[in-house]
Image: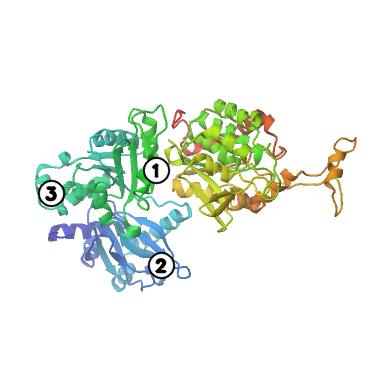
Amino acid sequence: MTGRDAAYVNEQRRRAARSLLGLDASDPDDADVEHLAREMAWLTCVRGESVCEQGQPSDGVFFLAGGRALAIHRDETTETMRVVGEIGPSEIIGEMGMLTGESRSATIVCTRDSELVRLDRPTFERLMATHPRLLLTVSRTVIQRLRRQVENRRTPASVTIAILPAGSDDGGPLGTFADALTTALGKHSATRRVTRADLPVDLADELTRDASSPRVVDWLNHLERTCQYVILQADPNLSTWTERCLRQADRLLFVARAECHPDPGPLERQAAQLAAGVTAARQELILLQSSAARLPYATGRWLELRAGQLERHHHVHLGTPATVERVARFVAGRAVGLALGGGGARGFAHIGVVRALREAGVPIDVVAGTSMGSVIGAQCALGWSTVEMLRRSRVGFIDQHPLSDYTLPLVAAYSGRGAARMLHGLYGDVQLEDLWTTFVAVSSNMTRGTVAAHAHGRLRTYVRASMSVPGLLPPVTEHGDLLVDGGVLNNLPADIVRDRVGTGAVIAVDVNPRDGLRAPTDYGEILDGWEVAWRRFSPRPLAVPGIHDVLERMTNLGSVHQAAQSVRATADLYLHPPTDMVRFLDFHAMDAHAERGYQFARPLVSEWAGQTGYANEVRWSRW
């Protein structure tokens, strides 16, 4: 970034000095400010450039005058990199090492063209002795950063979003969508929408000559200091204003009418050229649907052509504010995710929990489910009412009964034909990526020994994989791999939901029994199945667990302690409805199970929603 005059640089040094001394912008400069400002060096970094490297000596502290940066930690054992913090304007960089004397704990990389001022260690240590306020400010910064890490908050002081056309779309709907998003984000915090026409005349003229005009950048940086969210509506073509939007934004929303051709457009290709690994702006796809009365379709082709580039996609109907408000919650870091665990018939309690959430006005933006949690989660993501969920489940689990197709048990006790028939009746040929609400079906990959989180592909196939209890149903095959019940490795996928909502809220519903199976009859080392069957018709039947219960418990055994430890740490609201007494195949009492879940969850959800500000945030609709 070039063209800075001395007056501007001196003012930024004074602003940095005031911040380091704990003074507000309205406080008058004093001798301390002038003294500290004179000691600071001025630096500029282009997007993707490192400010300092992990492992280097902590030889200076930086103040970010303008731009954005990421703190990236490299695990020296696994050589993997992880983003541990986001740094916005007016924040300090490198303060921890200056206090402890240790080497840099992370690499700081600029995600935008940025401007910084630097104070070297000898000067910093000398000034700390004469300016106690400097030490106090740096100590506060350390505490705030540690608190943000503990609370898993990485959202910077402000967020700048660029809205651009995608595919073959001519950009016609950009203005309408930008207006709707501005209104939706305005419910969270101060929001400003900016188009080329909003630039002062002199700046607009300057921009036509230079997309990196320092005065234009200053004007946009000032907006970021006064608004939490700045929405930059790009031109529909590649122009200096569009280039500025691409370079200024933290998040890129590519918008297209769903019926347009999905091949990436010129602005998407330009964004790909600017991408620089972990420093690339987040990209999301907004597909505008012409009707809210039916499910979207053919989303898969859009995603295939952008594989590895998108963080997520959204389906939006501009006449339905709820669909835009969901996008706004993701941008604002307030999306709500629901994790539903496996547990056979106990999983019908999930329907009652969904009812309680909807009645409290709590949004559900992401659903992930394992086993029966996958079955119910898919219904929730489809937008069915809880009455409809029970009605269709009654047809599927009672009238059709998925476990009625006994077969020669060389691979499993049942052929899977009944389960496939039931799921086809429930979901037809719906694709996961075509759902209005993001849904993830969780299975376990037996071949690779990993958790599989399915968000694309045929819905019924991956729900079938998620509920494939080993020994009861045969595994589902995928490219030669074997997929079985997700409960083997992750019976309550709160971590998967956390990955998708970021700093938002995670609600986890656990229907796994706390106590294991028991055998009231002490039958010793030998148990004859023929005797068990015969005694069922006698006055004294053998009280032993059935094979369904044993296999189901074995499937979930690895996740018994997961809920009590890692899930509770991950979830913002953990619910365990009283369903331990419910048998695995007790489908006929599903209405009672759902009511039990509702009565248990209602007061807890109401209290949590009131405390977190989610109460009555939405009025439930199928979206």
View extreme (front): residue: 408
- Circles 1 and 3, Cβ within 8 Å, touching? The answer is no
Drawn side of residue 545 relative to residue 427, left or right: right
Residue flagged by tag 1: what amino acid is it? Answer: Gly
- Residue pointed to by mark 2: 105
SS class, disc 1: helix
Residue 300 - label: 1
Callout 3 environment at 10 Å: few (<14), some (14 to 19), or many (20+)? many
Marks counted in the figure total 3
Answer above or below: position of 421 versus 6. above
- Residue pointed to by mark 3: 207
Callout 2 environment at 10 Å: few (<14), some (14 to 19), or many (20+)? some
Drawn side of residue 527 relative to residue 56, left or right: right
Asked if residue 571 shows in the view, the reply is: no
Residue at point 55% right, 59% down?
448
Q: Give residue 414's position: percent from left, percent from top.
A: 67, 43
Residue at point 35% right, 71% down?
58
SS class, disc 2: loop
Q: Give residue 438's position: percent from left, percent from top.
A: 45, 40
Residue flagged by tag 2: what amino acid is it? Answer: Ser
Answer above or below: position of 288 versus 563. above
Quarter-of-image position of residue 67: bottom left
* Of residues 365 and 136, the one drawn nearer to the viewer in this rendering: 365
- How far apart are the two marked residues, 3 and 2, measured between alpha carbons? 39 Å
